[in-house]
Amino acid sequence: MGGIGKTTVATSLFKKISPQYNSFCYLDDLSKIYFNFGATSAQKQLLSQALNEVKNMEIQNVFHGTMLIRTRLRHLKMLVVLDNVDEVEQLEKLGLRPEYLGAGSRLIIISRDSHILQNYGVNEVYNVEVLNETQALQLFCKKAFKSHDIPKEYKELTFEALKYASGLPLAIKVLGSFLHGRDVCEWRSALTRIKENPSKDIMDVLRISFDGLENLEKELFLEIACFLPINHSYWESQMENLLEYRQFHPDISIKVLIDKSLISCEDEKIEMHDLLKELGKNIVREKAPKEPIKWSRLWSYKDFQKVMKINKVNKIFRKMYS
C-alpha cells in the first residue's frame, strides 16, 4: 500500500549494495517519466546512469533504445532499480530484460500492484510489511521528540497516535513531525481533529491506488472500507456472500484489490488497514461532508438515524402537498 516504505527500503538497499556492481541505475519514478516524457526518455536515463554519460544520448525511437540497451549493457554487472511502476507496458517499452545485462546483475522493480510483477515474470516478490510496535515507536519518537525517549506526560498520547497510524510509516512520520514541539493540550486537540479529518498528506498517497482502479473495483473497495468491522477480520466466504448479494461479482475483483495491496487475505480472512478504511469513508463523504443523506453508503447508526428522520419528514411533507 502507499506510504508503507517501499521506496525507503529500496533506496537503503541500493546504497548498501551498489558498490558490489560495475554499474548501477535508479529510476526513481518510472510512471512519472513515462507520463511526462515518454518511453525513450526512460531509456535515455537508464543508459546515461548505467554508462555514466552526462551528455544527452540520442535515441530515435523505442526500438532503437532497446537495441542500445541490449548491445551496451550486456557485458556489465549491473544493479537496476525501477521505482513506481504502475503498468506492465512501462516495463515492456523500457526494453530491459535481465538477460540483456551481464552475469551477476540484479533488477529490482517497485510497484503497488503485484500482478504487474507476476506478468513480467519476476523471480521473487517481497511484500513490505507495516512496522511492528517497537519499530513504529522508534520512528515516532525520532520525529515527535527528536529522541528515543517519551516524556512522561506524552506517553498515553504517544500510544494513541501510534494506534491511529497502525504501523504505516508515512502516517507515523507525518503525525510525529506535526506534533513535534507542541504541548499536551495541542496534542490532544490534534489527535481528535485528525480522527475526524485525516491528514491530506496521508490520504493523497493512499488514494493513488484507489484512483487507478476500474469503477467496479472502486465500488468494491468502498463497500469493504465502509462495512468491514474495525479491528476485526472478516471471513472471505461471508464477504463474498454479501458482495454477491450486492451484485459485485467478487471473485476477480477481490483478487485485484489484493494485488494492489488494498486488502489482504490470509486463512480465508479479509483484512484492510484502518487508514484505508478511513480513506474509503472520506471518499464517500467528500462531496457533502455534513449531509449523510447524499452519501452512497451509511455505516454509522447516528447517520442512519438522521437520514431516516429526514426521509420521514420528507414523506410527511409530500403527503401534505400531494
Image: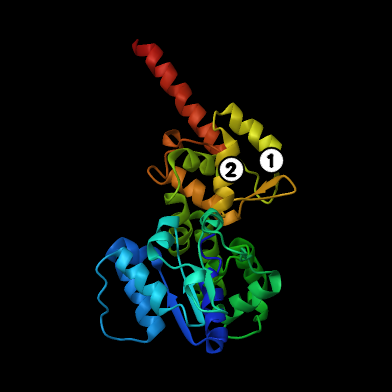
What type is the residue that disc 2 sits on?
A: Ile
Q: Residue furthest top?
A: 322
Tell me the residue at 47%/49% (across/down). 282
Left or right: 204 in relation to 59: right
Left or right: 129 in relation to 286: right
- Asked whether 310 or 165 is in front, the reply is 165
Give the image quarter of residue 246: top right
Quadrant, the C terminus = top left
Tell me the residue at 64%/35% (across/down). 240
Tell me the residue at 50%/46% (across/down). 281
| Label of residue 189 in the image | none
Question: Is 302 situated above or below 10?
Answer: above
Question: Is 191 situated above or below 309?
Answer: below
Q: Position of residue 31 (x, y in %)?
A: 39, 63
Left or right: 50 in relation to 15: left
Question: Is 268 situated above or below 163?
Answer: above
Question: Is 320 situated above or below 298?
Answer: above
Q: Which residue lies under the disc numbered 2?
A: 254
What type is the residue that disc 1 sits on?
A: Glu
Q: Secondary structure at mark 1?
A: helix
Q: Residue furthest right?
A: 267
Tell whether label 2 touches label 1 (CB within 8 Å). Answer: yes
| Label of residue 236 in the image | 1
Q: Secondary structure at mark 2?
A: helix
